[in-house]
Amino acid sequence: MSAKAGQGVVGFGYEGADLEGFLGTLLARGVRTVVDVRLTPISRKPGFSKRRLAAALAELGIDYVHLPALGNPKWNRPGFSGSAAALAAARAAYAERIACREARDGIEQIVSRAGSRLVAVLCFEADQQRCHRDIVLDQVRDRLQHRAGELI
């Protein structure tokens, strides 16, 4: 997708990061909104639980949005770190899960924001291919490309 500078969507996993470094990366990339797609936005990593993260982002002028409808249920998480077959099954189960209206509305919220600003879709996993946010990003990018095609 070709987007204007400061627009679009990127994925971020905070595994291995500290809060200060993570925030610095967001600022350097020009992120204006963080969309948290963790089902339950709590973390053992200092600063990455919902309230503290939202407050730290707000201090930098970055919006925080939590979309639990786009979270990956606990029972489906092991497949994302499993074999190729387990990963494929987990991705398929997640894609089926987010076919509901509430999840589609969440995708649409991301698409709407990404049309005018850079949005980071956030979860823990550093390897995006092994995270459900990869599926979210694919759907968002598909919709953004479709909209760009309509404007031509």
Image (cartoon, rainbow, N blue to C red):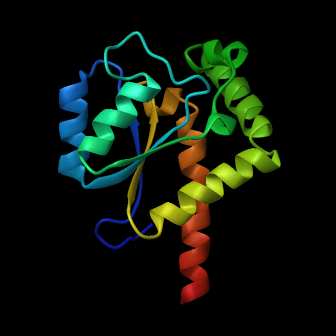
Report how many numbered discs are placed on residues in the image.
0
Residue at 82%, 45% (x, y): give it.
100
Q: Residue at x 53, y 29 (%)?
A: 131
Query: Is 89 positioned to the left or the right of 66 in the image?
Result: right
Residue 54, horizontal then vertical, whole percent? 39, 36
Position of the N terminus, as image quadrant, is bottom left
Percent position of residue 52, x then y? 36, 26
In front here: 140 or 129?
A: 140
From this viewpoint, is residue 35 visible? yes
Q: Is residue 13 visible?
A: no
Q: In this view, does 78 lie above or below 65?
A: above
Residue 122 at what x, y percent from top left?
Answer: 45, 36
* 138 is higher (above) or lower (below) than 94: below
Which of the 4 image quadrants contains residue 147? bottom right
Identity of the residue drawn at 59% across and 21% down? 80
Q: Which residue is drawn at 56% across and 61% down?
A: 111
Q: Quadrant of the C terminus?
A: bottom right
Front-most of residues 151 and 109: 109
